[in-house]
Image (cartoon, helix red, strand yellow):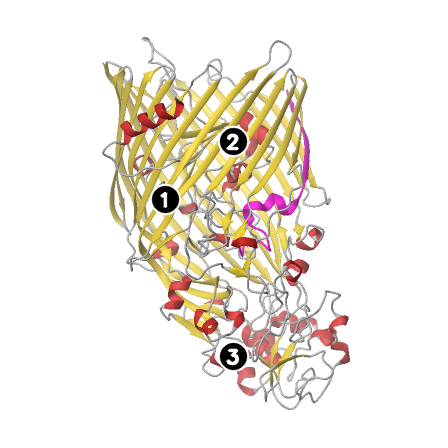
Amino acid sequence: MKESVISCSLRRLSAGGGGASLALLSLAVQAQTPAPPGPMPRVEITGTHIPRATTETAAAVITLNRNDIERSGKTTVAELLQTLAVDNQGSVPSSFGSGFASGASGLSLRGLGAASTLVLLNGRRVAPYGLADDGQKMFSDLNIIPADAVERIEVLKDGASAIYGSDAIAGVVNVILRRDFHGTALRASFGQSRERDGNDGVAAVTWGSGDLDADRYNVLASLEYGRRGAIWNRDRAGRGHIGRGDLRPWGFSAQESLGGTGAITINNAAGSAINGNVRNPDTLDYVNRGNLGGAGFTRTFPGAACANFTRHPQGDPGGGCLVDAAQLYGQIQPRQERINFFGRATFQATPALQTYAELNLYRSESASSSTPSAVSGAVGSPAGPVNSAAVALGAAHPDNPYFGRPARLRYMAADLGPRTSAIDSDFVRFLLGAKGSMGPWELDTALLFSQNQVSSERSRYPQRDVLFALLNPSPENVAAARANPAYAALPPGTVWRIAENAGLNAPALYAALAPTLNNDAKSRIAQIDLRASRQLTGLPGGNLGIAFGGEFRRETADLEAVPGTGRGNIIGQGYSAHKGGRNVAALYGEVLAPVHRTLELSGALRADHYTDAGDSYTPKFGVKWTPLRQFALRGTYARGFRAPSTAENGVGGLAAYSTAADPLRCALGIETACSPASVAIITSPNPALSPERSRSINVGMVWDPYRRTNIALDLWEIKRKNDINQEQSDAAIAAGRIARDPSSAALPGDPGPITAVLASYVNSARTQVRGADLDLRQRFDFGPGTGEASMDVKWTHLFKWQRTEQDGSTRDYAGTHGNCDVTNCIGTPDDRVNFRLSWERAAWRVSANVNYRGDLKNTLFKNDPAGCASHFANGDPAPANCELPSFTTVDLTVRWKPTPRIDVFGTAQNIFDQTAPLDPLTYGATAYNPLDYAGAVGRFFTAGVRYTF
């Protein structure tokens, strides 16, 4: 009977409309009875500028209050939001220390990317993070939000460009901070993993004074400090494959990138060994320097024996010296230290006028580490690819086994040390406003300034020209390097001694080879806005509400390139730079019409003018029908848009890395080319880009079959056209827009490995995403003295996540590991579930939180003709059945309140210590999916106390 009622109701709502589908989990709001006559308090809800008497609108909104945040056991808002079922492909985790947007966290509603999710603080914009994700997508950093100052978080799972403008295609996250607080609250907590690392300490103080009614003012301030320690891959050696680059024990081969670092694969190809692999000038075969019987050696180096460098298990058929560089030097979590301040002052000047000011300050310092640099990596630059495959030990280099003739070198520069990155982020937001009433109108106006400045410092990245001259001081190489003052100051004839002889190098050599590299980024918003709303003559269901508003803002963004990357001179560091600014002016109107006591209609229209992207007119319509007190139907139709960011249509460019197979060389029988490997990808801005435009449809129902039971079901579809994307790397490869290294050919007819993919930002034809949200909440009362229990289930299912290119080709990523051309290649789960079971009695509260990710096919998209994206050494699809198994974690939180002023709380995350499944494809983590981060860290304990006075 339940199914027939829901199905019938949804069919009646969607009759005559476009396709809709099941949607993301919403914290379902209660179906409301018609408002009784007489004045009622009105509240502000995300997704509308019209204050209303009920909290339910036609759109689905997730509301997380302070209790929900505490029950989650998470110490930051970013962590909480990224566990929600609504988050999907394109999410930016703070654990991705080697990404373009290192140091930040971003949310990707509907899997449409962090750039299509608008983040607001108290209903207004914030400056985006200074570093763009993937060098392209500008987004708001969730880390700027002080957890102790949060009143509630509202997540609008619906297009909202008609209300808020650009970037709200997928939805809106509105963080409402405290606006009125009395007294003082102190909070301190400390967390640590079962391995006694990843220490997470937080201390916060919140203070408030004044009563608006009695004193006509209120001032509050919240200060929060947090410090989180690093977690290293090497410290998870007991968790199987976690953090390992060498996956031979799990069936992979040393002859591919999953078999460790330093393997010698085929003729004229080898990995970078910790003691050096050199190429025989005659046969073009690579030989390890520690091989005392190397063919054609004119010198041998007993000190270069592999056993002198590592105890890692060997067994490379080609004779290379294998190490697991990712496990030795990589991180699961970077170190981060942060301080966050929020202050608000409110003054009730007259009964009809209130003035207010807000100040947000945030500083974060994070440090990440990655493997030492190779000497032969290809990089991209705005001028094209720069290939270092020809790097060689000079004929007279004292560490050259082929002394007398130059020999190509493949070397992992462990003597330089791991590459490190230190990111400092400073955020400021200042708001000065006034609101009040003028006759029947309620007005709100404000001036806003918001800025994010990011300073980056990178160490141990070698300069290509100096590296070439120090390894092979030919006249040409020396002439090219002498433009560098630090190299020119070295004694003539200086060479870089490698591996066992690295101790002979002077500090000045390393200073010239790999100087510290610094660059800055800054984004800024300055805005003025005015909003007005009022109620008009009553309709049969209540008063007609209207709202009008306008805003003007100036947006600028500037990212300096890392020194040397503009000409491809920094090995292992891609190029990313952009600069631009624009003015945005907007007018909007909104109406709320309760045309019947059971039927409410709403509509909105917004006009935006961008000086660099033209005009946009976006409407939205909604309907809510409550035929029964326990049952309501709701639906919305909305248009949306996203203007190109400065990184996409400004001045600059991007040269980065992705993963791709080489079908041409694979067809020639070159086995190493058949599996995805790292390639440079060079992308140029496109000033001719059009804005992305979208159409979204949502239909749903809210049903209270029993007094303590609440069910919500929402079906949705978003169609987005003119998608701004980087061209697919495999499509560019198939079209021949690549650069190759013919000198590294392995067979007759081999064109050589790919060194770079040449792409640009383009408006793809469209993206179509369909999904469903189911939310079930149940409360249980077991009688006097037994407490109360509650259950909350949120399930999001994706039916389709399909992208159509300009040539008409389509790819559906739902339930697969694609799209690997976006943030860290985490895949697109078609099922995510949040389940919470809580019990409260007197001073005690206990909650169990279950987070589930559905399985993922390890293919780049559904029905990929290339088949499985990874393979075992025997050629079978990898992992087993070409599938990443589902992953589930359980977190337990406990709160004890011995007195009204004291809260003691504790959390055990991943309490059953589940290990994340093996993922051989992602580049956002090592051998596990970033979505399964908790399964890499292992069981994690947190304890804390809050005191209020």
Q: Are marks 2 and 1 in contact (CB under 8 Å)?
A: no
Q: CA distance from mark 3 to mark 2?
A: 60 Å
Mark 1 = which residue? 769
1 vs 3, front mark:
1
Q: Which badge, 1 or 3, comes first in the chain's sequence?
A: 3
Q: Secondary structure at mark 2?
A: strand
Q: Is 940 covered by the magenta stretch? A: yes
Q: Position of residue 555 (x, y in %)?
A: 37, 47
Residue 343: mark in rendering: 2
Q: Position of residue 679 (x, y in %)?
A: 49, 66
Q: Secondary structure at mark 3?
A: helix
Q: Which badge, 2 or 1, comes first in the chain's sequence?
A: 2
Dot 1 surroundings within 10 Å: few (below 14), some, or many (20 or more)?
A: many
Q: Position of residue 274 (x, y in %)?
A: 67, 70
Inspect this view and state whether residue 51 appears: no
Q: What is the magenta range?
A: 922-949
Mark 3 = which residue? 744
Q: Residue at x 72, y 80 (%)?
A: 291
Residue 780 appears in which quarter of the rendering? top right
